[in-house]
Image (cartoon, helix red, strand yellow):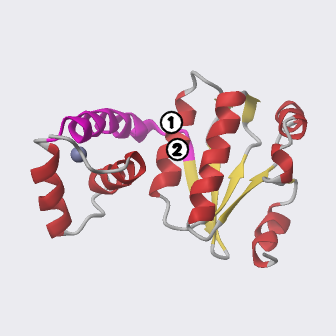
């Protein structure tokens, strides 16, 4: 069986399925589908393993004035081999609020994979009529953001209230 779902559609569907945010009919439809679909079945198994690992997630959400703030509980790296990168992607895809701030104060290192992930989070949120702002990047991370020109798309704020207010100016 050849799967007709686009990769992004499949990811979102699986994320919703695993977090039990599909209605009864959609659950039945998906369960009937994935058993016969290699692509969806494989992706589901991978996602299940990640979700199981997420109980020890390093990410925490808070809400303020209709803006979601994502923080790292402990020091993190947004680099090629870091588990945080995959977590970040999953969390953002599941997020229904499309106005998001990522607090980078505990991120000690970022590389091209991390930048790529931030950009794809940004694209995902913009597609959902939202946006992404960054908060409290440390000197090393800030240098990379500036050097690559990412900061012109994803402004880095040092004041959380200012970052929150910046959404209403759009
Ligand atoms: Zn499929």
Image coordinates of residue 79 in percent, x first then y, are 65, 26
> Circle 2: is it few (<14), some (14-19), or many (20+) Cα within 10 Å?
some
Image coordinates of residue 97 in percent, x first then y, are 55, 68
Judge whether residue 78 can be spotted in this image.
no
Quarter of the image where one finds residue 137? top right
Dot 2 lies on which element? Answer: helix
Viewport quadrant of the C terminus: bottom right
Tag 1–tag 2 contact (CB < 8 Å): yes
Dot 1 lies on which element? Answer: helix
Q: Which residue is mark 1?
A: 86
Quarter of the image where one finds residue 73? top right
What is the number of the mark on residue 40?
A: none
The alpha-carbon separation of the residues under discs 1 and 2 comes to: 5 Å
Image coordinates of residue 94 in percent, x first then y, are 45, 56
Image coordinates of residue 28 in percent, x first then y, are 12, 60
**What span is colored magenta in the figure?**
37-59
Q: Which residue is mark 2?
A: 89
In depth, the one of 85 and 75 nearer the eye is: 85
């Amino acid at each position: 069986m050849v799967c007709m779902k686009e990769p992004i559609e499949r990811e979102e569907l699986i994320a919703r399925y695993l977090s039990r945010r599909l209605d009864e009919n959609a659950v039945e439809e998906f369960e009937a589908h994935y058993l016969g679909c290699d692509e969806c079945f494989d992706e589901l198994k991978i996602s299940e393993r990640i979700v199981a690992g997420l109980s020890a997630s390093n990410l925490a959400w808070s809400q303020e004035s209709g803006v979601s703030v994502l923080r790292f509980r402990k020091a993190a790296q947004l680099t090629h081999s870091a588990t945080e990168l995959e977590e970040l992607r999953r969390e953002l895809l599941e997020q229904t609020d499309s106005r998001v701030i990522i607090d980078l104060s505990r991120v000690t290192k970022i590389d091209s994979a991390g930048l790529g992930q931030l950009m794809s989070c940004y694209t995902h949120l913009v597609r959902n009529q939202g946006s992404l702002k960054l908060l409290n990047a440390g000197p090393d991370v800030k240098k990379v953001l500036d050097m690559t020109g990412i900061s012109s798309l994803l402004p880095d704020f040092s004041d959380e209230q200012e970052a929150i207010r910046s959404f209403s100016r759009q």
